[in-house]
């Protein structure tokens, strides 16, 4: 293992979401809906389903057995607390604040004296769910005891930073102290079948400064793939299901349960940055390349197989049976963000952005109270792909996706910017005002844009006088003939339009560094940067080794992937062709439709209207396709 040195964090620092105020026509309504609809709905479901009552029972405040089918249902409460805490950071709400105080009191009361917190066992240790194992830590491959801890730590850090209150953080610290007394070089050598405790421990280290938490995160990672004193954690004869088939330093391909994988890669990135561990960084870079070259859907979704919610083999990307779990997309966004923070390379943000606007955003309805667990790229309108339904559902027995969404959206503004020394990175194009410290000085940046509907972005810089600084503006891969950073997808025809840049009204050359336009100059207040990213409608072809996409193409405009629903087609979706069933020269035209799905840019083609993929199934269940048949005249 490597020794510690003076590098103590990521080379690039993300700008906190609390420093970014949205004024964005696309994202503001969605974050408002998350605050006013999704978070309250999730808390109601946690109450109605007995998830919160389980804490009352564990605390001795309510009689009865554990209610639930899975031992990890505690995490739905933790994730709801995390999302509500983020929301409080940007929108004070006395009623919500008080509700969280009461809920956290319940969590604290349910914690056993030595720090153990797992309501399924505490309620009745003699009658636990089979997954839980007969004693503490006796079935770590499936019990999710450590997984529950990871989500607890994430929630505790979020609540402490949002409110300044130590109540949940104390619970987390007691739990982490217990883990470190049980597991470690001089204790039990084991790890969790479902990673996330590593991310949680790394975050606890950041908030509390307790380096033992960081060392514990590395310890749990180091136990993966080491089976001297325990069985291999696997599922359905899949030795890679829990990424336990090899030591993490040796892994080079994405295998197994896609959410578990993404969370593990995030934990590896954190340890790679904070200790540091360069071998971890090398491993996850190569795994990322394997994903973008062979295992990612054009929507950014990952995880092709329903069995095991897992990655498939290289180029195994079926459309109608795609799993592409919403949680996996969230995990992918977090992983790609960390890879950017390690490297400063925009290719990771290209994947992050396409996942965000497509495979992640599709997970929640426009109304904010119905969800996709599974995000296929084709549906016949009747097969119940979404855990028993052909459309969206208001809740699931396993409701990791709704609660994950409610915690993700309030944190979204924090993905917009990053800083390093005298550099400010602009990563996402979202109308906003941000107050950022760059190299010890205050900088204000105001973005005006109608992205993703338009590629025009206007940025106003204020530095309090004059100051030299480097501004690095991401030039998206989709505007440079690249799709998702790998070799799986390509635009069928090159675009004649190119990105352009103006500084205070004068045209400026775009000098690229790792995918960023670098503007190094002495800035003055009210300097204006104008970025133009042309958004022609493009058709995308797929690597022919992906059998399900042979002879087909997808439609993309800017970062948005489009699909056709049966209600918007003149005939069966299988008979549609992008060139109009042989009518050569037919074009695909973008049109702003304020009357459609809350206002979208739709794509009109011969015999159909395509809508953004994220918006499908908001008008009821029905057939849908992303990949359409094409002929040589498709454009």
Image (cartoon, rainbow, N blue to C red):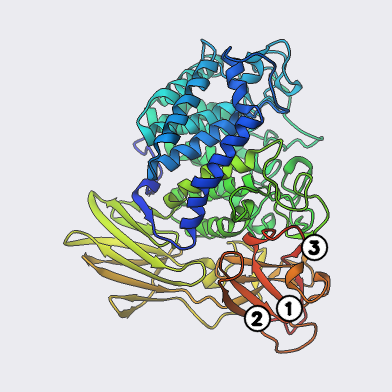
Task: Give the numbered dot on residue 243.
Answer: none
Mark 3 or 1, closer to the camera: 1
- Residue 377 location (% of width, % of height): 73, 59
Which quadrant of the view contains residue 162?
top left
* Residue occupying image coordinates x 72% and y 17%: 128
- At 67% from the left edge and 61% from the top edge, which residue is drawn? 616
Residue 3 falls in image quadrant: top left
The image's mark for residue 548 is: 3
Q: Residue at x 50, y 77 (%)?
A: 534
**Mark 2, residue position:** 588
Q: Earlier in the sequence, mark 2 or mark 1?
A: 1
Tell me whether circle 3 and circle 2 mark residues in contact (CB < 8 Å). no
Q: Position of residue 483 (x, y in %)?
A: 60, 66
Tag 2 near tag 1, CB within 8 Å: yes
Q: Within 10 angstroms of label 1, few (less than 14), some, or many (20 or more) residues?
A: many
Q: Residue placed farthest to the front in the image?
A: 95
**Screen quadrant of the C terminus:** bottom right
Query: Quick check: can you spot residue 575?
Result: yes
Side of 131 where 207 appears, left or right:
left
Of helix, strand and loop, which one carries label 2? Answer: loop
Identity of the residue drawn at 76% across and 21% down: 130
- In this rendering, does residue 1 appear at all? no
Residue beneath disc 1: 578
* Mark 3 surroundings: few (<14), some (14-19) or many (≥20) residues within 10 A: some
Of pointers 3 and 1, the one earlier in the residue sequence:
3
Between 441 and 421, the one nearer to me in the picture: 441
Q: Quadrant of residue 431?
A: bottom left
Q: In the depicted view, which residue is nearer to us: 123 or 337?
A: 123
């Amino acid at each position: 293992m490597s020794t510690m040195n003076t590098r103590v964090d990521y080379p690039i620092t993300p700008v906190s979401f609390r420093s970014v105020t949205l004024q964005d026509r696309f994202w503001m309504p969605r974050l408002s809906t998350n605050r006013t609809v999704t978070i309250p709905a999730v808390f109601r479901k946690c109450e109605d389903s007995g998830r919160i009552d389980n804490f009352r029972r564990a605390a001795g405040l309510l009689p009865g057995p554990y209610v639930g089918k899975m031992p990890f249902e505690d995490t739905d409460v933790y994730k709801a607390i995390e999302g509500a805490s983020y929301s409080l950071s940007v929108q004070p709400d006395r009623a919500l604040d008080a509700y969280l105080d009461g809920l956290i009191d319940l969590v604290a009361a349910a914690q056993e004296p030595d720090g153990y917190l797992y309501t399924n066992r505490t309620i009745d240790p003699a009658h636990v769910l089979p997954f839980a194992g007969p004693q503490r830590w006796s079935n770590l491959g499936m019990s999710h005891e450590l997984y529950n801890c990871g989500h607890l730590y994430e929630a505790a850090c979020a609540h402490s930073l949002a409110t300044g209150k130590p109540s949940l953080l104390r619970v987390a610290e007691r739990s982490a102290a217990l883990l470190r007394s049980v597991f470690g070089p001089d204790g039990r050598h084991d790890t969790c079948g479902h990673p996330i405790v590593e991310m949680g421990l790394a975050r606890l280290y950041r908030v509390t400064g307790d380096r033992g938490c960081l060392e514990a995160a590395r310890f749990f990672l180091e136990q993966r793939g080491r089976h001297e004193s325990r069985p291999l954690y696997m599922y359905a004869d899949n030795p890679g299901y829990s990424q336990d088939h090899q030591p993490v330093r040796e892994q080079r391909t994405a295998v197994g349960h896609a959410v578990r994988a993404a969370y593990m890669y995030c934990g590896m990135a954190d340890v790679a940055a904070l200790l540091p561990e360069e071998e971890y960084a090398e491993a996850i870079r190569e795994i990322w390349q394997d994903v973008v070259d062979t295992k990612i859907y054009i929507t950014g979704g990952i995880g092709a197989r329903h069995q095991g919610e897992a990655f498939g083999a290289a180029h195994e990307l079926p459309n109608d049976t795609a799993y592409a779990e919403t949680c996996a997309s969230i995990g992918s966004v977090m992983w790609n963000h960390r890879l950017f923070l390690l490297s400063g390379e925009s290719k990771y943000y290209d994947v992050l952005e396409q996942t965000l606007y497509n495979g992640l955003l599709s997970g929640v309805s426009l109304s904010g109270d119905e969800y996709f667990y599974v995000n296929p790229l084709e549906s016949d309108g009747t097969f119940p792909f979404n855990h028993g339904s052909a459309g969206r559902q208001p809740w699931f027995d396993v409701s990791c996706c709704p609660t994950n969404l409610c915690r993700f959206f309030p944190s979204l503004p924090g993905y917009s910017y990053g800083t390093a020394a005298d550099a400010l990175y602009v990563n996402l194009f979202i109308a906003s005002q941000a107050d950022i410290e760059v190299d010890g000085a205050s900088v204000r940046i105001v973005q005006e844009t109608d992205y993703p509907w338009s590629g025009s972005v206007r940025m106003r810089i204020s530095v309090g006088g004059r100051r030299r600084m480097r501004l690095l503006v991401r030039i998206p891969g989709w505007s440079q003939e690249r799709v998702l950073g790998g070799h799986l997808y390509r635009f069928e025809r090159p675009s004649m339009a190119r990105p352009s840049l103006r500084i205070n009204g004068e045209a400026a050359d775009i000098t690229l560094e790792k995918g960023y336009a670098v503007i190094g100059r002495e800035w003055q207040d009210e300097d204006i940067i104008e970025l133009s990213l042309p958004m022609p409608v493009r058709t995308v072809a797929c690597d022919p080794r992906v059998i399900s996409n042979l002879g087909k193409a997808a439609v993309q405009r800017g970062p948005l992937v489009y699909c056709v629903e049966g209600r918007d087609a003149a005939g069966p979706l299988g008979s549609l062709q992008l060139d109009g069933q042989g009518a050569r020269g037919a074009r695909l035209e973008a049109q702003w439709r304020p009357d459609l799905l809350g206002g979208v840019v739709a794509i009109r083609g011969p015999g159909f209207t395509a809508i953004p993929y994220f918006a499908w199934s908001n008008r009821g269940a029905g057939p849908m396709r992303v990949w359409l048949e094409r002929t040589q005249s498709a454009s």
